[in-house]
């Protein structure tokens, strides 16, 4: 199974994609190499989050929508409250996208 393109919509992922597109347009990189860089980016982000992030956050709110498609869960939570240790933050609406990271290595 191909890697999920989870992190490409983040700020760093979008900047990387724009830079690679520009390098392909200018003939600096081949399109194949640019795709390999993006795939490695997804894998590296997954590994970094798995090995370096040890914090846990509690999320409470009203589950507005949930969906499971292609082994990816999508949740939309309204009036969400994030709680970490003694810190609490309220958010009007949050979209959570989750998948099994073990599927990325297959």
Image (tube, rainbow, N blue to C red):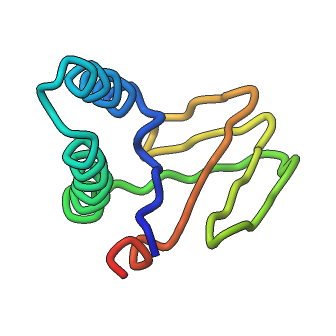
Quadrant hosting residue 2: bottom left
Residue 105 locus on image (x, y percent) = 32, 76
- Classify residue 77 as left or right of residue 8: right
| Near-viewer residue (71 or 3) | 3
Quadrant hosting residue 44: bottom left
Quadrant hosting residue 92: top right
Residue at 25% of width from left, 49% of height from top?
Answer: 32
Q: Residue furthest left?
A: 28
| Near-viewer residue (58 or 22) | 22
Is residue 103 positioned above or below 91 on the image? below
Is residue 88 positioned above or below 22 on the image? below
Residue at 46% of width from left, 51% of height from top?
Answer: 5
Quadrant of image for the C terminus: bottom left
Residue 70 locus on image (x, y percent) = 66, 69
Residue at 46% of width from left, 45% of height from top?
Answer: 84
Residue 88 locus on image (x, y percent) = 55, 34
- Classify residue 58 as left or right of residue 77: left
Instruction: Count how many numbered circles sit on residues in the image.
Output: 0
């Amino acid at each position: 199974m191909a890697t999920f393109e989870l992190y490409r919509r983040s700020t760093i992922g979008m900047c990387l994609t724009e830079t690679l597109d520009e390098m392909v347009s200018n003939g600096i990189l081949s399109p194949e190499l640019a795709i390999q860089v993006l795939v490695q980016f997804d894998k590296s982000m997954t590994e970094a989050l798995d090995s370096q992030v040890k914090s846990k956050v509690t999320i409470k709110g009203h589950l507005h929508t949930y969906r499971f498609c292609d082994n990816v869960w999508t949740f939309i939570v309204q009036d969400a409250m994030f709680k970490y240790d003694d810190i609490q933050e309220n958010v009007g609406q949050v979209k959570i996208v989750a998948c099994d990271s073990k599927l990325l290595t297959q």
